[in-house]
Amino acid sequence: MVGLRAVLIILCLAAPASAQITSARYVEPTDRYGHGAVPGGEYGALEVARADGARVIARVTGGVFEDAKPRLHDFDRDGLPEIVTVFSGDDMGAMIRIYAWDDGKLVLRGANSPIGTRHRWLAVAGIADFNGDGVDEIAYVDRPHLARRLTLVTVRPAADGFAITPLTSVGGVTNHKFGSPVIEGGIRDCEGESPVVVTASANWSRVIETRLDRGELKLTNVGPYQGPDSLSARLGC
C-alpha cells in the first residue's frame, strides 16, 4: 500500500490461523516523526495478542503509527477481528490502515488515501453501519485541529483485503485538542436506532451529535461543551 511495507516478527510459537486476536496495542514509541499531536503517540510497530498466548509485531517503514490506540473490529463478520490503525507517512499525511491475521501471518489488508502532506492527521471516532446496508463505516475527523471535518469511509471486503472508500463528510466538528492524549467523544450505537457520532463543535463550545440521514450527515447541537465528560455522557444507550 502506497509503497509502504510491514515486517513481521513472531515473538513466540506461531499460533493456528484460527486463533482469536484478543487485543492490540502500539509499541516501540519514537520521536523521529516529530508531529506531537498526541503526546507519546507516534510508534514504529503494532503488536497483537492472541487467545493462545502468541504475540506478533508488525513493524512499519516510511512512517509511523500515529494514534491513541488501535481498534479491533470484525468487518467481514467471520468471527475474527481486524485491526484498525492510523498511519502517518514521512512524506504524506495520515491514512487508515487495516491489518488482519491471514494464513498464519499478520498482514496489511487495506488502506485509504492519505490526507495531504506530512503532519496532517485524522482522529478516529468509531465504527458502525451508518446507512443500514450491512457494511460498516469508519468515522473520523479529518484534521481535527485544521479542517475539522467529520468523514465516513465504507470498509467493504474485497478479493485482496478491504476496499476503503469515501461515503460522505461534513465540516464544523472536532474530537481532539492538539497535544491531548485523548480522542474525545465517540459513537453511540444503540439497538433499533441509527448510529450517532458525538463530537464537539469546531470551536469547542457545544456538544454536537451527527447522524446520517438519507445520505447526508446532519448535525444537532445538544448542549454546551464543558469538558470531555460532556461528550462521554452522550455515548450510553
Image (cartoon, rainbow, N blue to C red):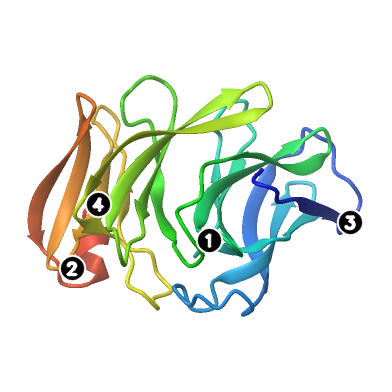
Element at label 2: loop
Between the C-alphas of marks 3 and 1, the distance is 23 Å
The amino acid sitting under disc 2 is: Trp
Ranked by sequence position, the earlier of labels 3 and 1 is 3
Q: Which residue is mark 4?
A: 198
Q: Which residue is mark 3?
A: 12
Q: Mark 2 against mark 4, which lies toward the viewer? A: 2
Element at label 3: loop
| Total residue callouts | 4
92 over 220 or under it: above or below: below
Q: Is residue 117 visible?
A: yes
Element at label 4: strand
Between the C-alphas of marks 4 and 3, the distance is 40 Å
Q: Which residue is mark 1?
A: 69
Element at label 1: loop
Residue density around tag 4, few if under 14, some if 14–19, many if 20 or more, within 10 Å:
many
55 vs 31, left or right, is right
Whether pointer 2 and pointer 4 mark residues with C-beta atoms closer than 8 Å, the reply is no
Whether pointer 4 and pointer 3 mark residues with C-beta atoms closer than 8 Å, the reply is no
Between the C-alphas of marks 1 and 4, the distance is 18 Å
Between the C-alphas of marks 2 and 4, the distance is 12 Å
57 vs 233, left or right, is right
Q: Mark 3 against mark 1, which lies toward the viewer? A: 1
Ranked by sequence position, the earlier of labels 4 and 3 is 3
Res. 103 mark: none
Q: Which residue is mark 2?
A: 204
Q: Mark 4 against mark 3, which lies toward the viewer? A: 4
Ranked by sequence position, the earlier of labels 1 and 4 is 1
Q: Please identify the quadrant where the N terminus is shown.
A: top right
